[in-house]
Structure formats: structure tokens, C-alpha cells
Image (cartoon, helix red, strand yellow):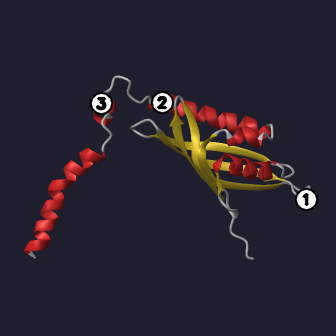
Amino acid sequence: MTRSLLLLSSAALLMPAWQAAAMPANHAQEKNSPAAVDAGADEKAIRGQVDRWHELMKAKDSAGIAELYTSDGAVMPPNAPIGKGRAAIQQVWASLLQIPGFELSIVPEQIIVSSSGDMALDRGMYKLTIAPDGTAKTDTGKYVVVWRKSGDEWKAAADIFNSDLPASGG
């Protein structure tokens, strides 16, 4: 019992030191810096990237879409393997864009920028229309994109989406 109490006490005493050691040297300075995070401007920039994504989808430009992702980014479509890195991301988007009647609308509902200003969460809804056999089919669903700021530009680091439609048996 005494030994357990001693270990817990030691851990409690060391925790602040560990946290300080793990904190980047400029963290306290960044927090109080006059160049504080402008979450409104960052949100606007991310919404601009979403608008660009729409333009690239209309243009069927899978290479352009892949450039919206970080070099180590990932796309995680439903019922398909993960696409890691820009080449794989481009392949995933190329296969989606070639589906006859492909139209995708992405609507961000919430964008939360981290207090450090280098990451953001984008949660929203999508509407997808395809016509693989000539008959239009519509799907609605939700998505999450984790954005990472690189220099002055926001890039998608992780992108996952899934349908609101019930799973079909099979």
C-alpha cells in the first residue's frame, strides 16, 4: 500500500515536469504572441479549399484534387481500401470521377480550427449523384476532413466519408 502511494505521488510530482518537457519551446510564446490564430480567416481559407474541390470535381481533375491533400494524406472511402499518399488519392478520385453522371456536393457544417492554428476539423454532409446504368441514383451522407496547415495553405490530411443509406445485404 505504501509503495503504491509512493508511486502515485512520484507520478503526480513528475507530471508537470513531463508536460513542460513535452511542450514545444515556443508554445508559451505562441499562445501569447500578437500574431494569434485568426480562426475566422482560417475557416474562410478552408471553405475556399472546399470551393476549389468542387471546381476540380466538375473539371474531373483527379490530379488537382490529389494536390488538395498533404503528401502523406489519406482518403478513406466506404467499402474500399484506404488511399495513402497523393498517387493513391489521385487513383481513388479518378475512379470516382469516371462513374457516369458523377456529381458531388460537399457542405461543411462545422469547421473547428485548433488553438495552435495548424490543424482543423471539417465535419459536414455530402450529396452524391451517379448514373452508372443511365438512371440517376442519389446518395447522401456525412464526412470528416482533418486539415493541416502547411505554410499559409490548408491541405487535407485525412478524409473519410460514408453513406446515410442502409447497408445492403451481400
Give the mark nearest the N terminus, 1 or 3: 3
Give the mark nearest the N terminus, 1 or 2: 2
Under mark 3, the amino acid is Gln
Question: Which residue is situated farthest in the left direction here?
Answer: 2
Q: Which mark is residue 169?
A: none
Residue at image coords 28%, 34%: 28
Few, some or many C-alpha atoms within 10 Å of disc 2 (few <14, some 14-19, many ≥20)?
A: few
Q: Which mark is residue 40?
A: 2
**Distance in Å between CA atoms under marks 3 and 2:** 21 Å
Few, some or many C-alpha atoms within 10 Å of disc 3 (few <14, some 14-19, many ≥20)?
A: few
Question: Which residue is situated farthest in the top direction here?
Answer: 34
- From the image, which quarter does the C terminus lie in? bottom right
Left or right: 126 as drawn, with respect to 119 = right
Please state which of residues 33 and 106 is positioned toward the viewer in this rendering: 33
Q: Which residue is mark 1?
A: 133
Give the mark nearest the N terminus, 3 or 2: 3
